[in-house]
Amino acid sequence: MVLDEPTAALDSRAEKEIQTAIDSLEEGRTVICIAHRLSTLANMDEIIVLDHGRVVERGTFEELLKAKGHFAKMAEQQRLTAKD
């Protein structure tokens, strides 16, 4: 399943509803999700971060936040934090 910015134009309430639906649909499937709103990626098994077409980081949401790299900088701009 390919999701290209599935929550980009949604308010936070609608985003949560769509995310719940996506979570139930993705079980047992490979999902490629393209997103600038990083909260959309919080439950993904693996996140691959691209910069100018090159892979610069990969890991879980929490791992990428803790790595303090590209992903963490984008998350900071969006005011997202680790769950620990």
Image (cartoon, rainbow, N blue to C red):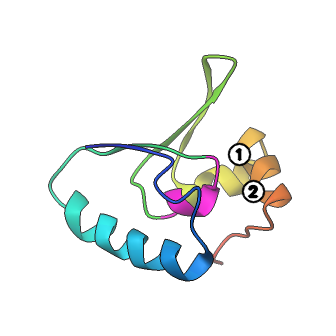
Circle 1 residue:
71
Q: Could you say whether the residue bearing mark 1 is in a helix, strand or loop? A: helix
Image location of residue 78, percent across then percent down? 78, 61
> Farthest front residue?
9
Quadrant in which the N terminus is drawn: top left
Circle 2 residue:
75
Side of 71 relative to 77 (left or right) = left
User: Is 77 colored magenta in this rendering?
Assistant: no
Closer-to-camera residue (3/11): 11
Residue 26, above or below 5: below
Marks 2 and 1 close (CB-CB < 8 Å): yes
Side of 29 relative to 11 (left or right) = left
Res 26 → quadrant: bottom left
Image location of residue 17, percent across then percent down? 41, 79
Residue 53, above or below 69: above
**Image: magenta residue range:** 36-42
Closer-to-camera residue (47/5): 5
Q: Could you say whether the residue bearing mark 2 is in a helix, strand or loop? A: helix
Q: Amino acid at mark 1?
A: Phe
Residue ID at (83%, 59%): 76
Residue ID at (59%, 63%): 39
Mark 1: few/some/many CA within 10 Å (<14, 14-19, 20+): many
Image location of residue 61, percent across then percent down? 56, 57
